[in-house]
Structures are given as structure tokens and as C-alpha cells.
Amino acid sequence: MLALRHARRAGSHTHARTFAAVSSSINPSGVGPFQVFDRNAKRLQKDRAVARDGGERSRTVDYVRNEVADRLMERFMDIKRKFETVLDLGSGAGHFSKLLEEDKAGKVTMLDLSGKMVERDPDSEFEVAVDRGVLDEEHLLQSIPPNSQEAIVSCLSLHWVNDLPGVLVQIREALKPDGVFIGALFGGDTLFELRTALQLAEVEREGGISPHVSPMANPRDMSNLMSRAGFTLLTVDVDEVRIGYPSMWELLDDLRDMGESNAIIGRRHFVPRDTLAAASAIYQQLHGEDAGVPATFQVIYMIGWKPAPNQPRPLERGSGDTNLKTVL
């Protein structure tokens, strides 16, 4: 299991630059996507996570984002190109941006829904120049011009957007031709242990269930979504980060301090203590180990390129001159 890591202490903060208002939709018809998540509630959750204990508790629970950022950086380093600018979309406190080196990027622009989160850590923790701003990922093109970005990165924020296909289209539009998007988001099997324990406890104690863990993307659908959004040269793969906790209670506390609490519209704001106690017992019985209980975070990694005339292209079907039978 992944050991818990403590983030470095942060110093002084500067005020975030507001890139766009988040109240209107880019859909010209005026009809928005089906709303699953309360984006304002998610912003408040992130703000409160940073405000708690002066941000120290928030830094303590960076371990999942830091691990995923490390793995995302490995994929980014495989791209043999230096980017003058990188846009970190839904950056949080800059878990990915802190890993950028000067031989890979000249400058990074960090954008996040929460101004307090994006300003949490000082510039001294970054090796490249940093610009920061507040922006809702669902309205990227309201503030970022089309065909303006060399590289866009997103590390663990897109699982909270209501219109994932629409956001992917906006990312592709914001990229320059032959620009790259590389992202990571939680997949549908994330926290399956917690989900099943809560559902079984509610059925037992209350005779029904309500959503406590948000719906997330199916890894099998991501290649299709990326292709429909207009990306080429796709790479999609799935990994897991497995964390050990003493009990379900510590997991719930850490999710709150990460800003990853439930933000589904219509969610229950109060769960009876006896239901949570039953869920904790079920969690331990179904998934418990000697040292406590595990929590699985399924992560989908994706890389896609905006089409350009000079990009490599696959040969036409039937144009090969080597018979596979001779190779195999």
C-alpha cells in the first residue's frame, strides 16, 4: 500500500487573478448539460479544506494527488518536447506543476475552481515560473482563447465536471495544432469498498440507499470520448492507487480534508450516526485486513493530440508489405 506522505509547508500567498465568471454556459443554445454535481458546493469544499488548520491538514492529505501527479509526470516526460507554456487545468495546489523542470517547460499557468486552493503553496516550491488564476473547468473557452495552448494538463479534477465530453472539446479547441492534452481522473471503481459498505448499511438501517460516492467515468468509454472530442494519437490506460486506513472514519476525514466530499446535487447533508457505524462494521467485515481497511482509487490516464497536418498518420488499410504470418 502507498505510504501516507506529508506535503511541504507553505509560506505567504498572493491573490488569485479571476479569469472568468462561472455563471453562464458556453452552449449557444442556452441549454446546458444534465447537472449531476453542485459546482459551487465543490468550490466551498475546497476552500474549507484549505482554511482548516491554516492549510496544514490539507497538505497532510496530499498523498493521493502527489502519487497520481508522479505517475502523470512519467507519461509527460515520455513526450520528447519542451513546452514554453503548460496550462494546469484544475491544478489544485499544483501537485503536477511542482514536478515540472526548466528543461521541460518555461512557465506553468495554474487554474482552479477554488482561489484558496490554487494559492495555497508559495512560488518557492516550483522550479518554473508560475501564473495562477480562478476558473471553472466547465467554462474554459470563456477565458482561454482557441488555438492558444501548447500543452494542457489536468490532474484529478475532471471527475467533478458535469459535461465531460464538452470539457474535452473545449480543451481540444484551446490547444494549438499539434498541442497535447494529458490528464488523469478517477474511474468508476474508485472507493468501491466505501460505496458498497454505505449502501448495505442504509438498506439495513433505513430500508433504501442514497448516493454518497459520485458517479465517475468508465475506463472503457474514455477512448471513445477522446476520439469524439477530436483528439488523435490517443493513449488511455488505467492504474490503481491503494491506501490503507485504520478504519472507515479516517478515510472519511481525509476525503473531507482533500476537498473530495460528496458534491452530488440532491445529496443527503446528514447521515445518522448509527448508519455510519453500521457502514464501518460492514467495511471492516467485507474488506478489512490485519492493519485496517483498504481504499482503492482507480485512475484513468489519457493522452491526446490536437490534429495537425504534420502529425504522423497511420497507413491506409491494406498498404502493408509484410505478411503477419511470416512474423508470427
Image (cartoon, rainbow, N blue to C red):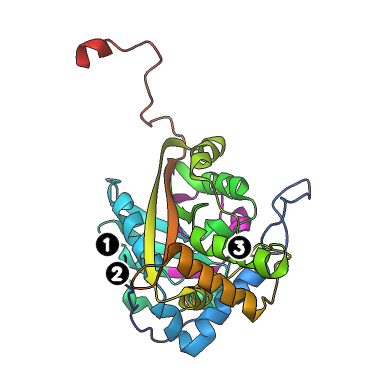
CB of mark 2 within 8 Å of CB of mark 1? yes
Q: Is residue 137 magenta?
A: yes
Residue at left offset 49%, top offset 57%: 190
Magenta stretch: give its range. 131-156
Q: Amino acid at mark 3?
A: Leu
Foreground tag (2 vs 3): 3
Mark with earlier residue (2, 1): 1
**What whole-number distance in Å separates the C-alpha atoms at marks 1 and 3?**
50 Å
Tell whether position 290 is magenta.
no
Q: Earlier in the sequence, mark 1 or mark 3?
A: 1
Is residue 121 toward the left or the right of residue 80 in the image?
right
Disc ID at residue 102: 1
> Is there a contact, CB below 8 Å, between mark 2 and mark 3?
no
Is there CB contact under 8 Å for labels 1 and 3? no
> Where in the figure is residue 16, as x and y percent of width and height?
53, 75
Mark 1 crowd level (few <14, some 14–19, many ≥20, 10 Å Cα): few
Q: Amino acid at mark 1?
A: Glu
C-alpha gap between disc 2 and disc 1? 7 Å
Q: Amino acid at mark 2?
A: Glu
Between circles 1 and 3, the one closer to the viewer is 3
| 154 horizontally vs 100: left or right | right
**Circle 2 is placed at which residue position?**
127
